[in-house]
Amino acid sequence: PFFSLLSMPFIIRSLENLLEKIKLDPEGLAKELHVSRSSVYRWLSGETSPHVGNLDALYSLSETYGLKITFYEKPILKN
């Protein structure tokens, strides 16, 4: 699945919400997800979006803290 650019603001708000709630900075989030710091900064800037596996990992991380923050709306499937 691919995500439309329209959903990027939603993903960014969700990421910012997660970072605020669990008191992590982007570097700490990168360590938690085993991704590069630059990946997290690109997600936060809207330059790129997290892959589906990372979106699932973000949701799981939010669940760990009892938050259940959603990181994507409906995917837009492209053939």
Image (tube, rainbow, N blue to C red):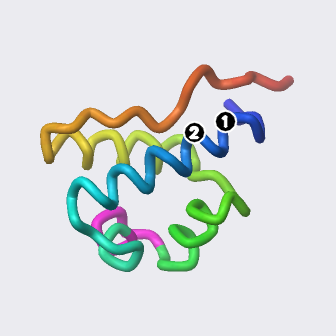
Please state the extent of the stretch shown in magenta in the rendering: 30-35
- Is 57 situated left or right of 5 in this image? left
Q: Where 29 sits versus 73, above or below? A: below
- Is 7 situated left or right of 12 in this image? right
Disc 2 and disc 1 in contact, CB within 8 angstroms: yes
Classified by dominant secondary structure, the portion drawn in magenta counts as helix
Q: Which mark is residue 70?
A: none
Residue type for callout 1? Ser
Q: Residue, x 33% and y 52% (percent of image)?
A: 18
Q: Where is residue 10 in the image (x, y as percent from the top left)?
A: 57, 39
Q: Which mark is residue 10?
A: 2
Residue type for callout 2? Phe
Q: Position of residue 53 (x, y in %)?
A: 47, 45
Q: Quadrant of the C terminus?
A: top right
Does 15 appear in magenta? no
Q: Mark 1 sits on what residue?
A: 7
Q: Badge 2 local density, few (<14 within 10 Å), some, or many (20+)? A: some
Distance, label 2 to label 1, CA atoms, is 5 Å
